[in-house]
Image: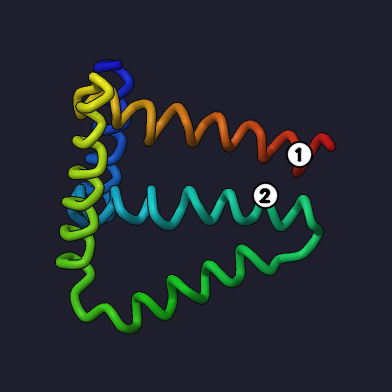
Amino acid sequence: MNAIFQLVYSLLMWMAKVSGRTYQEVNIVVYYFVIPEIYFVLVDCMFKRFLFSISYLVVWGLLLIFVPNFNRFANRLFDKSVSFLSSFTRLGWNYTIASVIICVVLPVILLIVLVYYAVVV
């Protein structure tokens, strides 16, 4: 689990450095925009309509218009995400384990299922 956590962390840190953004900003963009948008595109492919992906882009576009300070917004959302992941200590998971299961394993499983239904079926 630690190796996967460190790999993802390093990738996000690299993306932050390359983009000139903070780790928190990149984390929020990846987990709250990019990954869900990929899911919505796959769902749209399943239904042969682009309602979900376009709607999600519009919602994010409006959000970005009305959020005066994206860095502050990203920091708050990141802190809420850390609190959420830390709440899994009730299950005996530490932050690292919860991060890998919730933010890596489950998204990959969902991606595989969506790709299967969007492309294969």
* Residue 13 at least partly seen: yes
* Residue 6 at least partly seen: no
6 over 25 or under it: above or below: above
Q: Nearer the viewer, residue 101 or 35?
A: 101
Give the residue type at disc 1: Tyr
Q: Secondary structure at mark 1?
A: helix
Mark 1 crowd level (few <14, some 14–19, many ≥20, 10 Å Cα): some
* Mark 2 in CB contact with mark 1 (< 8 angstroms): yes
Distance CA(mark 2)–CA(mark 1): 8 Å
Q: Earlier in the sequence, mark 2 or mark 1?
A: 2
Q: Nearer the viewer, residue 18 or 111?
A: 111
Image position of 9 (left or right of 119): left
Residue 104 image position (x, y, % from top left)? 41, 31
In the picture of the structure, the residue carrying the numbered disc 2 is 42
Mark 2 crowd level (few <14, some 14–19, many ≥20, 10 Å Cα): many
In the picture of the structure, the residue carrying the numbered disc 1 is 117
Residue 45 image position (x, y, % from top left)? 75, 53
